[in-house]
Image: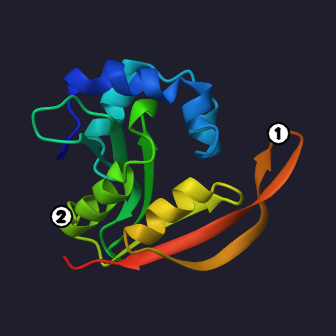
Amino acid sequence: FLRRATAEDCAMIAEWLNDPSRIAMLSSNLRAGGLSAQTINVALRRKDQVWMLFAPERSASPVGLVALDNIDLIDRIANLWFLLGDRRMEGRGLTSAAIAAFCAANPAGLHTATAWVVAGNGASLRCLEKAGFSEIGRVFEGVRWENGWRDRILMQTRLEP
């Protein structure tokens, strides 16, 4: 159901991260697209990141990704982000279940995980809330969106290392 991403997964992840319809509400460095499998392979080896894939069951192909970046091992905090790669799996609760399992596994031994959601992205907001995150604030007009701006909704959850 949930496993670490490996070098063999990089081409699939690159395909997901280069699809404009999948990355529209991610951070600006990911929204730009153009990520190669080689770049993702480098990211998988970074000590300040953890990338894990999820599937509906152990024997199934991965359908999405949950990741941590900016891992701070002193303060034990990091930013969580996620992506459903297989659109056929939308609305089944897999992403929120994967986020909850990821947080329960706590692969980086964190005290707190943060995340943010573009205002108007109700599906991602519900995923985080179902996984135990709660809203802690907003950055007004914190995301450049199409020809304007949207708020960045800040979320967090406490984890047990």
| Label ID, residue 46 | none
Residue closer to the observer: 59 or 31: 59
Give me the residue at 21% from left, 68% from top: 104
Give me the residue at 44% from left, 19% from top: 36
Q: Of all residues shown, which one is farthest toward the front?
A: 92
Residue closer to the observer: 28 or 92: 92
Can residue 34 be spotted in the picture? yes
Give me the residue at 17% from left, 31% from top: 60
Q: Which of marks 2 and 1 is nearer the N terminus?
A: 2
Left or right: where 113 falls relative to 137: left
For badge 2, the amino acid type reads Ala
- Secondary structure of the residue carrying tag 1 is loop
- On screen, residue 94 above or below 134: above
Left or right: where 143 falls relative to 85: right
For badge 1, the amino acid type reads Glu
| Label ID, residue 105 | 2
| Label ID, residue 146 | 1
Residue closer to the observer: 73 or 69: 69
- Secondary structure of the residue carrying tag 2 is helix
Q: Quadrant of residue 147?
A: top right
Left or right: where 143 falls relative to 106: right
